[in-house]
Image (cartoon, rainbow, N blue to C red):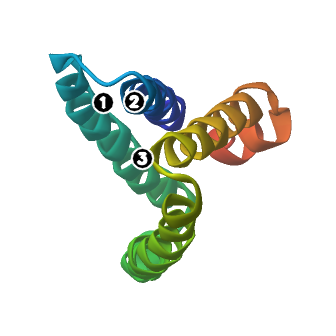
Amino acid sequence: MLFLLSLLSGTIRFFLLTIHSLYIGGSWILLTQILHGIHFTGYMAGNIYFFHKKFPEHLYGTAFGIFIIFSLSGGAILGNLLYGSILNKFGYPYLFIVSLITHLFLFTLILYNKKIDKIFYDYN
């Protein structure tokens, strides 16, 4: 559920950023920072919950540490390279549209895919 909340807030955030980049104006853009907080917090809290349920206590720290290395470090590097090239070639509106489409895809995938649902919620 935390992942869905995270993806939903990310979807709304990138929708607002897309609108703002196409039609500049409005102080409502500050709302995107609140949505970013919900987005990141839901993602991290969901991962902590997932790792606590999927790994034995003596392996939890190692598993979560490896995840953090790849998620935050690798994700930041790949994200900056990918989004930097999109930004250079197409500009901000397309950057936010790509993010919006990605979040919509992941939200729909997790919401309707029973196999993914079983991975996250079936702990037996």
Q: Position of residue 119 (x, y in %)?
A: 72, 48
| In front of the other: 36 or 119 | 36
SS class, disc 1: helix
Q: Distance of mark 3 from mark 1, alpha carbons?
A: 12 Å
For disc 2, the marked residue is 13
Residue appearing at x 83%, y 33% in the figure? 114
* Drawn side of residue 112 relative to residue 41, left or right: right
In the image, what residue type sits under mark 1?
Answer: Leu
For disc 1, the marked residue is 35
Q: Position of residue 21 (x, y in %)?
A: 40, 33
Q: Which mark is residue 73?
A: none
User: Are the residues flagged by discs 2 and 1 in contact, CB closer than 8 Å?
Assistant: yes
Residue appearing at x 36%, y 26% in the figure? 20
SS class, disc 3: helix
Residue appearing at x 39%, y 55% in the figure? 48
Visible residue check, residue 13 = yes
| Residues packed near mark 2 inside 10 Å, few (<14), some (14 to 19) or many (20 plus) | many
SS class, disc 2: helix
N-terminal label among 3 and 1: 1
* Drawn side of residue 32 relative to residue 108, left or right: left
User: Are the residues flagged by discs 3 and 1 in contact, CB closer than 8 Å?
Assistant: no
In the image, what residue type sits under mark 2?
Answer: Arg
Q: Distance of mark 2 from mark 1, alpha carbons?
A: 6 Å
Visible residue check, residue 124 = no
For disc 3, the marked residue is 43
Labels 2, 3: front one: 2
**Compared to 56, does 21 lie above or below?**
above
